[in-house]
Amino acid sequence: MKYLRRKNHGDKSSVTDKHTSVVTGAPKRIKMNRSKRKTFVVALVTILLISASGLSAYHLTRKEKNSNEQAQAEANSNERQIRLNKERADAAGSNEEKIAALLGLAADYMLLEDEEGSINTYKQVLELDPNNEAALGSLANIYYERKDKPNAELYLTRVIDVIGEASDPRVANTLTMYETMLTNTRNGSFEPYDSGEVA
Protein backbone atom coordinates (compact mmCIF):
# COMPACT_ATOMS: atom_id res chain seq x y z
CA MET A 1 0.00 0.00 0.00
CA LYS A 2 1.31 3.41 -0.96
CA TYR A 3 1.87 6.11 1.55
CA LEU A 4 -0.28 9.13 0.64
CA ARG A 5 0.15 12.54 2.11
CA ARG A 6 -2.47 15.28 2.11
CA LYS A 7 -1.46 18.87 1.61
CA ASN A 8 -3.61 21.92 1.90
CA HIS A 9 -3.12 24.63 -0.77
CA GLY A 10 -5.45 27.35 0.37
CA ASP A 11 -8.84 26.48 -1.10
CA LYS A 12 -7.49 23.44 -3.04
CA SER A 13 -6.34 20.20 -1.56
CA SER A 14 -3.98 17.70 -3.09
CA VAL A 15 -2.96 14.13 -2.57
CA THR A 16 0.63 13.23 -3.38
CA ASP A 17 2.77 10.17 -3.38
CA LYS A 18 6.34 9.98 -4.52
CA HIS A 19 5.33 9.65 -8.23
CA THR A 20 2.29 11.85 -8.76
CA SER A 21 0.72 15.05 -7.66
CA VAL A 22 -2.99 15.55 -8.02
CA VAL A 23 -4.59 18.88 -7.37
CA THR A 24 -8.36 18.97 -7.36
CA GLY A 25 -9.57 20.65 -10.55
CA ALA A 26 -6.15 20.36 -12.29
CA PRO A 27 -4.96 17.63 -14.68
CA LYS A 28 -2.67 14.90 -13.39
CA ARG A 29 1.01 15.66 -13.70
CA ILE A 30 4.03 13.49 -13.37
CA LYS A 31 6.65 15.02 -11.18
CA MET A 32 10.07 15.15 -12.80
CA ASN A 33 13.23 16.86 -11.93
CA ARG A 34 14.49 19.45 -14.44
CA SER A 35 16.96 17.13 -16.12
CA LYS A 36 14.33 14.43 -16.74
CA ARG A 37 11.80 17.04 -17.92
CA LYS A 38 14.32 18.47 -20.38
CA THR A 39 15.16 14.99 -21.69
CA PHE A 40 11.45 14.20 -22.00
CA VAL A 41 10.73 17.42 -23.92
CA VAL A 42 13.68 16.87 -26.25
CA ALA A 43 12.54 13.29 -26.88
CA LEU A 44 8.95 14.41 -27.49
CA VAL A 45 10.02 17.14 -29.92
CA THR A 46 12.32 14.68 -31.69
CA ILE A 47 9.48 12.18 -32.06
CA LEU A 48 7.18 14.88 -33.42
CA LEU A 49 9.82 16.08 -35.89
CA ILE A 50 10.58 12.56 -37.05
CA SER A 51 6.91 11.78 -37.59
CA ALA A 52 6.35 15.13 -39.36
CA SER A 53 9.37 14.63 -41.61
CA GLY A 54 8.26 11.07 -42.29
CA LEU A 55 4.87 12.38 -43.41
CA SER A 56 6.56 15.09 -45.48
CA ALA A 57 8.86 12.52 -47.06
CA TYR A 58 5.84 10.31 -47.74
CA HIS A 59 3.95 13.18 -49.39
CA LEU A 60 7.01 14.26 -51.40
CA THR A 61 7.61 10.69 -52.51
CA ARG A 62 3.94 10.39 -53.45
CA LYS A 63 4.06 13.69 -55.41
CA GLU A 64 7.24 12.55 -57.20
CA LYS A 65 5.60 9.24 -58.00
CA ASN A 66 2.48 10.98 -59.34
CA SER A 67 4.64 13.40 -61.33
CA ASN A 68 6.70 10.52 -62.75
CA GLU A 69 3.54 8.58 -63.58
CA GLN A 70 2.08 11.63 -65.32
CA ALA A 71 5.31 12.21 -67.29
CA GLN A 72 5.38 8.53 -68.26
CA ALA A 73 1.74 8.69 -69.37
CA GLU A 74 2.49 11.78 -71.48
CA ALA A 75 5.55 10.10 -73.00
CA ASN A 76 3.50 6.99 -73.76
CA SER A 77 0.82 9.16 -75.33
CA ASN A 78 3.41 11.01 -77.46
CA GLU A 79 5.06 7.74 -78.46
CA ARG A 80 1.66 6.33 -79.41
CA GLN A 81 0.99 9.47 -81.47
CA ILE A 82 4.38 9.06 -83.18
CA ARG A 83 3.52 5.49 -84.05
CA LEU A 84 0.13 6.59 -85.44
CA ASN A 85 1.69 9.39 -87.53
CA LYS A 86 4.30 6.98 -88.90
CA GLU A 87 1.51 4.59 -89.88
CA ARG A 88 -0.45 7.46 -91.44
CA ALA A 89 2.61 8.57 -93.43
CA ASP A 90 3.24 5.03 -94.65
CA ALA A 91 -0.41 4.50 -95.60
CA ALA A 92 -0.86 7.93 -97.20
CA GLY A 93 -2.18 7.85 -100.73
CA SER A 94 -1.19 11.36 -101.76
CA ASN A 95 1.78 13.62 -101.08
CA GLU A 96 -0.49 16.04 -99.18
CA GLU A 97 -1.60 13.28 -96.78
CA LYS A 98 1.96 12.09 -96.31
CA ILE A 99 3.21 15.66 -95.70
CA ALA A 100 0.45 16.26 -93.13
CA ALA A 101 1.36 13.03 -91.30
CA LEU A 102 5.08 13.85 -91.41
CA LEU A 103 4.50 17.38 -90.07
CA GLY A 104 2.49 15.86 -87.19
CA LEU A 105 5.27 13.36 -86.61
CA ALA A 106 7.92 16.10 -86.51
CA ALA A 107 5.82 18.06 -83.99
CA ASP A 108 5.51 14.93 -81.83
CA TYR A 109 9.28 14.49 -81.89
CA MET A 110 9.64 18.09 -80.69
CA LEU A 111 7.24 17.35 -77.80
CA LEU A 112 9.54 14.50 -76.81
CA GLU A 113 12.50 16.89 -77.16
CA ASP A 114 13.93 14.69 -79.92
CA GLU A 115 15.33 17.39 -82.19
CA GLU A 116 17.17 14.93 -84.43
CA GLY A 117 13.98 12.97 -85.09
CA SER A 118 12.21 16.22 -85.81
CA ILE A 119 14.95 17.49 -88.14
CA ASN A 120 15.02 14.23 -90.10
CA THR A 121 11.24 14.27 -90.46
CA TYR A 122 11.16 17.90 -91.64
CA LYS A 123 13.82 16.99 -94.21
CA GLN A 124 11.57 14.15 -95.43
CA VAL A 125 8.81 16.73 -95.91
CA LEU A 126 11.21 18.88 -97.95
CA GLU A 127 12.01 15.87 -100.17
CA LEU A 128 8.30 15.73 -101.03
CA ASP A 129 7.77 19.52 -101.13
CA PRO A 130 11.00 21.58 -101.28
CA ASN A 131 9.06 24.81 -100.63
CA ASN A 132 7.05 23.66 -97.61
CA GLU A 133 6.97 26.77 -95.44
CA ALA A 134 6.22 24.88 -92.19
CA ALA A 135 9.20 22.54 -92.60
CA LEU A 136 11.57 25.33 -93.71
CA GLY A 137 10.49 27.62 -90.87
CA SER A 138 10.74 24.87 -88.26
CA LEU A 139 14.22 23.87 -89.42
CA ALA A 140 15.26 27.53 -89.42
CA ASN A 141 14.03 27.89 -85.83
CA ILE A 142 15.71 24.69 -84.63
CA TYR A 143 19.08 25.63 -86.14
CA TYR A 144 18.73 29.24 -84.93
CA GLU A 145 18.14 28.04 -81.35
CA ARG A 146 21.13 25.70 -81.68
CA LYS A 147 23.21 28.65 -82.93
CA ASP A 148 24.17 26.59 -85.99
CA LYS A 149 25.05 29.51 -88.27
CA PRO A 150 25.38 27.73 -91.66
CA ASN A 151 22.16 25.72 -91.34
CA ALA A 152 20.20 28.57 -89.73
CA GLU A 153 21.23 30.91 -92.53
CA LEU A 154 20.40 28.30 -95.20
CA TYR A 155 16.88 27.58 -93.94
CA LEU A 156 16.11 31.21 -93.02
CA THR A 157 17.08 32.29 -96.54
CA ARG A 158 14.94 29.55 -98.07
CA VAL A 159 11.86 30.30 -95.95
CA ILE A 160 12.18 34.05 -96.69
CA ASP A 161 12.33 33.27 -100.42
CA VAL A 162 9.23 31.05 -100.16
CA ILE A 163 7.21 33.61 -98.22
CA GLY A 164 8.31 36.43 -100.53
CA GLU A 165 6.28 39.60 -100.58
CA ALA A 166 3.18 39.23 -98.44
CA SER A 167 0.10 41.38 -98.28
CA ASP A 168 -1.42 39.59 -95.26
CA PRO A 169 -0.16 41.34 -92.07
CA ARG A 170 0.27 38.01 -90.25
CA VAL A 171 2.49 36.70 -93.03
CA ALA A 172 4.31 40.03 -93.12
CA ASN A 173 5.02 39.67 -89.39
CA THR A 174 6.36 36.16 -89.97
CA LEU A 175 8.54 37.43 -92.80
CA THR A 176 9.85 40.25 -90.59
CA MET A 177 10.62 37.72 -87.85
CA TYR A 178 12.63 35.52 -90.25
CA GLU A 179 14.45 38.53 -91.70
CA THR A 180 15.41 39.69 -88.19
CA MET A 181 16.58 36.18 -87.30
CA LEU A 182 18.65 36.04 -90.52
CA THR A 183 20.29 39.39 -89.70
CA ASN A 184 21.05 38.15 -86.18
CA THR A 185 22.47 34.90 -87.59
CA ARG A 186 24.76 36.75 -89.98
CA ASN A 187 25.93 38.96 -87.09
CA GLY A 188 26.43 35.87 -84.92
CA SER A 189 24.21 37.28 -82.17
CA PHE A 190 21.37 34.69 -82.25
CA GLU A 191 19.22 36.98 -80.10
CA PRO A 192 15.73 35.68 -79.30
CA TYR A 193 13.20 37.28 -81.59
CA ASP A 194 10.85 39.70 -79.82
CA SER A 195 7.50 39.81 -81.62
CA GLY A 196 6.90 43.22 -79.99
CA GLU A 197 9.46 44.69 -82.38
CA VAL A 198 7.01 44.37 -85.28
CA ALA A 199 4.74 47.39 -85.73
Image (spheres, rainbow, N blue to C red):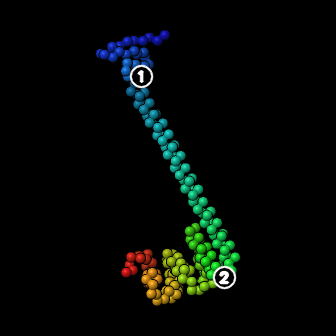
In percent of width and height, residue 152 lies at 51, 81
- In the displayed structure, 122 sits above or below 8; it is below
Dot 2 or dot 1: first in sequence order is 1
Amino acid carrying mark 2 in the image? Ser
Mark 2, other Cα within 10 Å: few <14 / some 14–19 / many ≥20? few
In front of the other: label 2 or label 1?
2
Residue identifier under label 1: 28
The residue tagged with tag 2: helix, strand or loop? Answer: loop
Amino acid carrying mark 1 in the image? Lys
Q: Is residue 90 left or right of residue 68?
A: right
In percent of width and height, residue 136 lies at 54, 82
Q: Is residue 126 left or right of residue 20?
A: right
Q: Quadrant of residue 129?
A: bottom right
Mark 2 → mark 1, Cα distance in angstroms: 88 Å
The residue depicted at 41 percent of the width and 28 percent of the height is 37
Mark 1, other Cα within 10 Å: few <14 / some 14–19 / many ≥20? few
Give 175 or 40, whichever is nearer the viewer.
175
Disc 2 and disc 1 in contact, CB within 8 angstroms: no
**Observer able to see residue 191:** no
**Which quadrant is the C terminus positioned in?**
bottom left
The residue tagged with tag 1: helix, strand or loop? Answer: loop
The residue depicted at 46 percent of the width and 40 percent of the height is 49
In percent of width and height, residue 165 lies at 46, 89
The residue depicted at 33 percent of the width and 13 percent of the height is 8
In percent of width and height, residue 179 lies at 45, 84
Residue identifier under label 2: 94
**Observer able to see residue 197:** yes
